[in-house]
Amino acid sequence: MTAWDDHWMRLVSKEVHGERGVLVFEAPTLAEALEPGQFLNLEAPGRLLRRPMAPAVVAGRVLVFVRARGVGTRSLLGLPVGASLRALGPLGNAFPLPAGRAVLVSGGTGVGPMLFLARRLAALGHEVVLFHGARDASEGFLLPFLRRSAAEVRFFTEDGSLGERGFPTELLPFALRPGDTVYAVGPEPLMEKAARAAQAMALPAYVSLEAPMACGVGSCLSCRVELRSGPVHVCKAGPVFPAEEVFFAEPA
């Protein structure tokens, strides 16, 4: 018997801002089963293969943050409200709990799992700080969602057009304290810098990896990555891994 199943999700609202957006689904059976860090394999209209997505669960609804990268993700952003899709899930592992304060770092569509984790940890009584990095003010539509996380939110834009100027990882080393646990999801350079900041203070850190995959359940074997402990498949062993297990590019 498997822990995952196929669930019907009905789109109840959405926001689309150019190439990015958030889809809000009603999916009671899936929302109840998901844990922060896990992912789902979502149907894409008109496409054979599903798309792996790391969601958030807010007020019993499943939120999927999408960036248009190809035909499949564009079709998801174009879904009409009221449409229904199937999603296979929950898939993969979840973030472990911290011992004390949690420092979360996100970029891009990494906002979904970090929002989910922040809400869960705050509900358990943990102090949570969430650093999010965006390109410019066009991603400001994410702020209302982040502010619902019950975390202290620090929002950065590369050009300073909204929030603080620069990258979240530039100030992260100055914000860390002994006893913190660091979590990072987003572009690899962001995760690498967050991991190195944690390593410099001997703090535990966890990252969520992306890899091309078709099935999401370990059958197609397309999501193989090499860790320090050996090869694994992201969908089965991850997507959450201790940062010290991950091979990041050596700094120049």
Image (cartoon, rainbow, N blue to C red):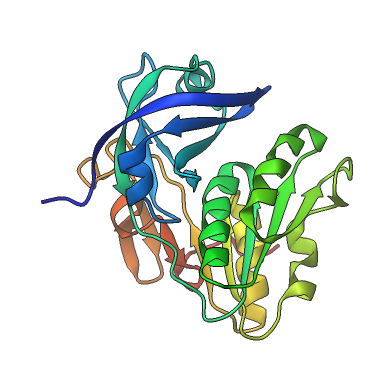
Residue 93, position as x, y percentages in the image: 35, 59
At x 50%, y 38%, the residue is 63
- Placement of 174 over or under 148, stated as above or below: below
Left or right of 227 on screen, residue 48: left
Is residue 63 or residue 206 the one in the foreground?
Answer: 63
Residue 80, position as x, y percentages in the image: 49, 14
At x 46%, y 39%, the residue is 61
Residue 53, position as x, y percentages in the image: 44, 39
Quarter of image, res 250: bottom right
The C terminus lies in quadrant: bottom right
At x 55%, y 46%, the residue is 112
Whether residue 19 is visible to the viewer of this picture, yes or no, is no
- Placement of 21 over or under 159, stated as above or below: above
- Placement of 151 over or under 97, stated as above or below: above
Number of marks present in the image shown: 0
At x 62%, y 26%, the residue is 15
Whether residue 85 is visible to the viewer of this picture, yes or no, is yes
- Placement of 193 over or under 77, stated as above or below: below
Left or right of 80 on screen, residue 39: left
Residue 8, position as x, y percentages in the image: 30, 29
Is residue 162 or residue 216 the one in the foreground?
Answer: 162
Which residue is at the far front?
59
Which residue is at the far left?
1
Left or right of 82 on screen, residue 106: right
